[in-house]
Structure formats: structure tokens, C-alpha cells
């Protein structure tokens, strides 16, 4: 094996056609964070790469370091999350996890925790027992923001520490009490604040026991969208457009 060749476990975050027969693939790797690589010939019927470079694949990959982009030269599929392809209603939630991970994880830095979180997230979504899929996505996003460095402050007022703090400011980075709140805040219900904290702190597999009200879901979605835009420069996501198209309530 040449020294420009390396092997890594990875999850496929996106895979799009490139030129006549290739694919341009974003991989989330345990050791090197996010990598964009080319899978040459992967769209040819007989390609040995074809089966392993689709979105929603977990595999073991061999890559060759290139001048600008690395090349995928071999793969071994560990897990295919086929439920996302078979169930149209499930697909955008799996896509949301991939999209938000692709935006929050940086390149060239080890990302073992985001990798484990995404793998667990895809498995839980695919096992079919989850009723509140959008709530699950909010929990995933909060946890990922926490792992990657910048998450909304949800434990009391971020200035004075008062526990009863229901005013949310994206610009200031989280919750504020009535006294500290300035002009750019949104007032949230106490139930929404308690729920958001629980989503951040409870293990991902516990989200399925939570039953939020419609108002709490609206407030969570508003909070997430504004924080995402302000701190992570993430505007519209294709997954969220699909979700609101397929399930207008969410
Ligand atoms: Zn305060």
C-alpha cells in the first residue's frame, strides 16, 4: 500500500453525479472529519464501487490522496440504511441528519463522536419505532452542536444564571431571564424550554418516549432555524423543505 493510500470507516453524507460516470462523495470519517472524494466510474453498472458510495451507507473505505480531491479506490459496506430509500416519508429525516452533520463537522479534524451520533441516529430512525421524527431531528441537531462546539445555552439565564429564563436570543447565544432580556428575544413557553433541555441532555434513544405539543414543536423549530442561521450560517435545507412538503404540520 503506497503512503498516499489510507483506509477509514466512514458514513456517506452525500453522493452526486460527476462527469460521465463518476460520483463526488462527501464522507464523514472517524479520523479525518469530513472528506470530499471522487469515486471514479461508480455510475457504471459493473463498477465495484457502485454499491458503497450512495448516501446512507456506512462502510470501510480505501482512499488515495490526490492533489485536490482524494479518490475512493475500494470499499466494503458495513450497513446500508435502505429504509430511507424504501419509505418516502422517512427519507427527508435521514437526509436532515446527513445535511446538518455535513454543515457542522469540519474537515481534517477527527470526528469520532459525530460519527457515532450519526450512526446511532440513522439506526434509530430506521428501526421504525419512532413517532416524533421531527422532535428526534431537533434532539440530534442540539447534540451535534454541543459536540462540535457551539450549542444554545439552555441552562438558565446566560448572563445572571436565573433558572427561570424563557427569553431566547440567537444573537446572544441562548436563554435570558426577564431582567436581562433585550430587544431581540423571543419568549418561549416553560414547557418548550424544559423540552429543549431534555433533548440536549437525554440519550438519543430516549427521545421516542417524549410527546410534545404542537406549540412546543413550533417554538423549537423557530428557535432551531434562527440559531442555525445566526451562528452556523445555515439557511434553507433541502430536507426541511421536503419535510414541510410531505407533512405540512411539521
Ligand atoms: Zn438574567
Image (cartoon, helix red, strand yellow):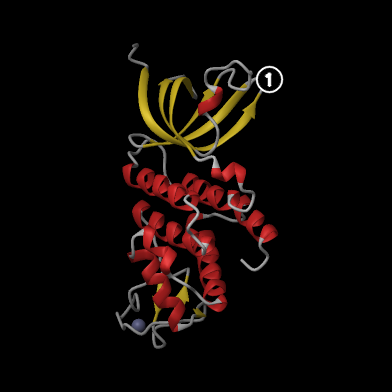
Give coordinates of residue 62: x percent, y percent. 40, 21
Above-or-below relation of 204 to 86: below
- Residue found at x 33% / y 14%: 3
Taking the view exactly as shown, the residue that stands out farthest to the bottom is 179
- Residue 230, percent from left and from top: 51, 62
Tell which residue pokes out farthest to the left in this image.
161
Q: Is residue 13 left or right of residue 32?
A: right
Residue drawn at (49%, 80%) of the image: 188
Residue 36 can be seen, yes or no: yes
- Please give the residue where the numbered disc 1 appears in the rendered image: 20
Going by the image, does 88 lie left or right of 51?
A: right
- Label 1: which secondary element: loop
Please indicate, yes or no, whether residue 153 appears anywhere in the rendered image: no
Percent x, y of residue 193: 42, 77
| Residue 150 against residue 23 in the figure, above or below | below
Q: On the picture, is 188 further left or further right than 46?
A: left
Residue at 63%, 18% in the rendered image: 44
Q: Nearer the viewer, residue 209 or 25?
A: 209
Residue 198 in the image, given as x and y percentages of width and height:
37, 70
Rendered position, 161 above or below 115: below
Look at the image and tell me in which quarter the C terminus lies.
bottom right
Neighbourhood count class around disc 1 (C-alpha, 10 Å): few under 14, some 14–19, many 20 upward: few
The answer to which image quadrant residue 196 occupies is bottom left
Amino acid at each position: 500500500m503506497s503512503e498516499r493510500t489510507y483506509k477509514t470507516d466512514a458514513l456517506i453524507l452525500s453522493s452526486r453525479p460527476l462527469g460521465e460516470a463518476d460520483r463526488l462523495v462527501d464522507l464523514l470519517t472517524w479520523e479525518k472529519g469530513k472528506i470530499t472524494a471522487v469515486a471514479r466510474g461508480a455510475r457504471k453498472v459493473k463498477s465495484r464501487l457502485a454499491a458503497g458510495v450512495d448516501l446512507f451507507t456506512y462502510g470501510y473505505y480505501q482512499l488515495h490522496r490526490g492533489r485536490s480531491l482524494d479518490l475512493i479506490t475500494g470499499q466494503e459496506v458495513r450497513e446500508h440504511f435502505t429504509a430511507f430509500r424504501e419509505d418516502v416519508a422517512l427519507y427527508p429525516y435521514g437526509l436532515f441528519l446527513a445535511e446538518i452533520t455535513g454543515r457542522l463537522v469540519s474537515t481534517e479534524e477527527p470526528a469520532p463522536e459525530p460519527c457515532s451520533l450519526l450512526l446511532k441516529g440513522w439506526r434509530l430512525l430506521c428501526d421504525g419505532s419512532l413517532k416524533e421524527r421531527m422532535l428526534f431531528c431537533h434532539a440530534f441537531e442540539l447534540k451535534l452542536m454541543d459536540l462540535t462546539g457551539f450549542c444554545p445555552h439552555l441552562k438558565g439565564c446566560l448572563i445572571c444564571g436565573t433558572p427561570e429564563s424563557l427569553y431566547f436570543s440567537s444573537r446572544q447565544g441562548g436563554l435570558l431571564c426577564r431582567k436581562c432580556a433585550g430587544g431581540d428575544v423571543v419568549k418561549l413557553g416553560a414547557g418548550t424550554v424544559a423540552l429543549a433541555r431534555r433533548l440536549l441532555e437525554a440519550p438519543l434513544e430516549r427521545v421516542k418516549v417524549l410527546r410534545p405539543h404542537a406549540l412546543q414543536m413550533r417554538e423549537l423549530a423557530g428557535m432551531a432555524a434562527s440559531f442555525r442561521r445566526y451562528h452556523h450560517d445555515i439557511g434553507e435545507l433541502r430536507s426541511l423543505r421536503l419535510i414541510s412538503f410531505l407533512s405540512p404540520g411539521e
